[in-house]
Amino acid sequence: MPRYDAPVRDMQFLLHDVLALQNYSNLPGFSEASPDLIDQILEEGGKFAKEVIQPLNKIGDEQGCVRNSDASVKTPDGFPDAYRQLVENGWPLLSKTPDMGGQGMPNVVGMAWSEMVSSSNMSFGMYPGLTSGAFEALMEGGSEELKQKYGPKMASAEWGGTMNLTEPQCGTDLGLIKTKAVPQPDGTYKITGQKIWISGGEHDLTENIIHLVLARIEGGPEGIKGISLFLVPKYFVSDADGSLGDRNAVSCGGLEEKMGIHGNATCVMNYDGATGWLVGEEHKGMRTMFVMMNEARLGVGLQGLSQAEVAYQNAVDFAKDRLQGRSLTGPKAPDLPADPIIVHPDVRRMLMDSKAFIEGGRAFAYWTGLYGDLLHKSPDEKVRERADDYMALMTPVIKAFLTDRGLKACIDSMQLYGGSGFTKEWGMEQFVRDCRIALIYEGTNGIQALDLVGRKLGANGGRAIFAYFAELDDLIADEADNEALAPFIDGLRTSKERLQEATNWLMQHGMTDFNNAGASSSDYLQLFGLTALAHMWTLMAKTALEKRNGDGASDPFYDTKIATGRYYIDRMLPETSAYLEKVKAGAESMMALEAEAF
């Protein structure tokens, strides 16, 4: 059976040394987040993920969820007890605000915990993960009454939460939604319609589930501008004492049969005149729902990273144990009939590709997560503006790049096993199947690329991307005389120049022919992601060099970190050249064939 050990040391390096969270102790939440407390959280979180959640991963995959005759849903054996322990130990409250019963830790610390949960059991982690997103949307757009009534139990994950967007006739194009909301005299609405692919729509983990549902108020405007957001509880909640009452008119009409994430209940949800409460303003539902969608997109990026991490860990174990062939430069284990396959360069290629991506991708996700904290907690208006810009700019890159490359890492790890990887016995093919959905849901990666190129680059006159270029230029200039860091600075400079050239090309040619923007968007996102990881590897290498030359001189961790970064610069970053050429190729050859020619 596969194993998982949380990469606590790497997380500590990022949070304490690279991001230096202790430098933000003047901000709410950070003042309590001492390095010692963060270390304790990471150690205990890793232990919980390994001992409680990870052993259920294979069980969840094999058993799946079952819809009963009364439309209730049974989750896999062990899930309810593990979920109970999750709630009792207060893990969902880690980064929630104290006014909702939370511990108030920085969100970036919560990201580390979320990564552990997802690595150990992606299907299980989706239940509290989506509840957290629904909670944040409620806090953003809900009335004070709704916040107080539903917020605390959603914050703790005692009650589940969902997001209901997709319908049989529409996926990404939410302007085609048909679910309707009819106003009632008491200020509520009757919700009627069907939603599909609703993760955690029905299950036996919580006593209540709070659905956030997009619907069109009867008589409202057509298209996306007529969409409103509603809170629809599975069970009604008493205003007097918060106890649960009658069942609302919402039910699970069926479970989807999926390629992976079998332990998560993906439901068809029927709303048969269910009672709902408006969240935010009429016809402005997408504005509030985007709070949840953006949090979900960051979470999905972490899912791609997390599956890559656990697949990589097991691939390393196999590569060190599996004997096959001899090293090209002579036997490395002469007392054995063959060498471990880790001696072979192509095996090293797959492992190093994964390792360099995972550590760089983790830094990119956490770096962006820190800006999410600054957006909400910094007293400096300029800092909040920069954080808001970066969160908008980086979210589609994190979602798409980390899931694209995360799937590749899972496939490479499975490939390393040879024929064994193709069998269920070793568990590697589950990581591939589970990870595959991350490229699709919360907006396919192609949609993320279009969002990046079509909306995010030009927002506020390109303020975000130009600020990012300036930040990279400053780092390059500041470290120009640092000879030990020169390979990283040179690689970052070249990659940044290519990204800037691609950006300028899109600004010039994308507006004259929108197909150019569409045709080049996915390649541009890959170029952006590679550059962002070059940025992260430069920061990590700089920090590792400083530690190695200081109090970490005898710690091999820093040498390993620098060597891994050099591999990224030497062997992975050159891809930026090809992506630049593909961006500049535009749409002509891509759109040349008539539809009938396919």
Image (cartoon, rainbow, N blue to C red):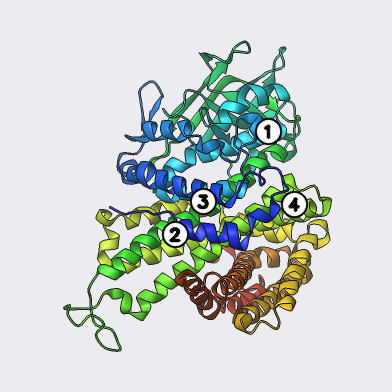
Q: Which residue is label 2 attached to?
A: 308
Percent position (x, y) of residue 502?
70, 73
As drawn, the residue found furthest toward the front would be: 551
- Residue at image x 44%, y 55%? 307
Are the residues flagged by discs 3 and 4 in contact, CB closer than 8 Å?
no
- The residues tagged by marks 1 and 3 sit, at their Cα atoms, a distance apart of 29 Å
Is residue 371 left or right of 306 when viewed as pictured? right
Cα separation between marks 4 and 2: 28 Å
Mark yes or no: residue 165 visible.
no
> Which element carries disc 1, helix, strand or loop?
helix
Q: Earlier in the sequence, mark 3 or mark 2?
A: 3
Name which quarter of the figure residue 520 lies in. bottom right
Does dot 3 land on a helix, a strand or a loop?
A: helix
Q: Say which amino acid is labelled 2.
A: Ala
Query: Where in the figure is residue 111, as x and y percent of width and height?
Result: 56, 49
- What kind of residue is marked 3? Asp
Q: Residue 144 is drawn in which quadrant? A: top right
Q: CA distance from mark 2 to mark 1?
A: 32 Å
With 159 as the anchor, is 331 left or right in this view? left
Q: Position of residue 201 (x, y in %)?
A: 49, 32
Circles 1 and 3: CB atoms closer than 8 Å = no
Q: Residues within 10 Å of mark 1 (few under 14, many from 20)?
A: some
User: How dense is the environment of label 4, judged by Cα within 10 Å: few (below 14), some, or many (20 and up)?
Assistant: some
Residue corresponding to mark 1: 139
Residue 531, placed above or below residue 434: below
Q: Earlier in the sequence, mark 4 or mark 1?
A: 1
Pair 1/3: label in front: 3
Q: Amino acid at mark 1?
A: Met
Q: Earlier in the sequence, mark 1 or mark 3?
A: 3
Q: Which residue is mark 3?
A: 39
Q: Which residue is mark 4?
A: 388
Q: Are marks 4 and 1 in contact (CB under 8 Å)?
A: no
